[in-house]
Image: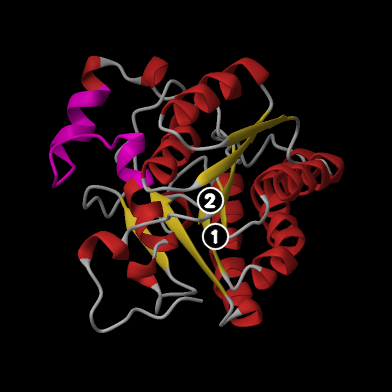
Amino acid sequence: MTQVAANHSTSSLFSLNGQVAIVTGAGKGIGRACALTLAQAGADVALTARTQADLDKVAAEIRAMGRRAIVVAGDISQEATMDTLVAETLKTLGKITILINNAGGAGPNSPLKMGGTDFSAVLAWNVTPAYLMIQKTAKAMREAGGGAVVNISSVAARYAQKHFSAYGAAKAALNQMTRNLAQDFGPAIRINAIEPGTIMTEALAPFLTPERTERMLSSTPMGRLGQPEDIAASALFLVSPASSWITGKILGVDGGVEAPNF
């Protein structure tokens, strides 16, 4: 990976000119924000999610910046989708140097009602695609001279709270996998993770009653809920030359909250 030169400029530290990124779950929310932010920094971007129309809108925004974008719609939990995404990225954009593993998620669960099959599905959805995407892009990243990966985790990985045993366990597993894979793939490929706190997305909005919103704001040191762009800015740092000596780390981007506030 690139070593920061002693005479670096601030603009070059955060420049992604000449880079090619893959972003999963890129149609909305954090994934969309990450894709647009990386493009603004100079990267060409390959986008994937289930909904073609959402991806097409993001791709159009990226192209309007003068960057290249390709769309591969599909289920990223399926290896066929992963293989197509990697192949199309290399064919059209020429290389792969950045991977944002954003796809994932789960709601609360009852520990007395959720069966083993559903529990395993939450673990698999939040961990396995990230693992396989790193595996499938590693060769291309090495051939390009190095790369950087960011796994989007959650503060649920470190909070102790009721009804989140499945999701919390899945994201904790993602965090530990991040640490271990950083050892496996360094120094050519840096692998880090971000733990978002409460982020204002379309998925969260229906659950925000005035009372719940006030409680969350009053318990957040920064006095506001997070925006997808807050996570995207942190992802930009972790894939840029500015973080060239950082790998295997979990970055909490949570407004300073240290306990469940939802």
Pointers 1 and 2 in contact (C-beta within 8 Å): yes
Q: CA distance from mark 1 to mark 2?
A: 6 Å
Task: Describe residue 129's horizontal placement relative to residue 182 as left or right.
Answer: right
Does the segment drawn in magenta span residue 231?
Answer: yes
Q: Residue at x 54, y 35 (%)?
A: 108
Dot 2 alpha-carbon crowd within 10 angstroms: few under 14, some 14 to 19, many 20 or more: many
Q: Residue at x 49, y 29 (%)?
A: 63
Q: Which residues are magenta?
A: 212-232
Disc sitting over residue 172 in the figure: 1
Disc sitting over residue 168 in the figure: 2
Disc sitting over residue 190 in the figure: none
Residue 18 sits above or below residue 224 on the image: below
Residue 94: where, in percent of width, then height?
68, 52
Q: Secondary structure at mark 1?
A: helix
Residue 134 sits above or below residue 205 on the image: below
Residue 90: where, in percent of width, then height?
73, 50
Corner quadrant of residue 160: bottom left
- Where the C terminus falls, by quadrant? top left
Q: Secondary structure at mark 2?
A: helix
Q: Nearer the viewer, residue 206 or 62?
A: 62
Does the segment drawn in magenta span residue 128?
Answer: no
The type of residue carrying mark 2 is Gly
Residue 205 sits above or below residue 150 on the image: above
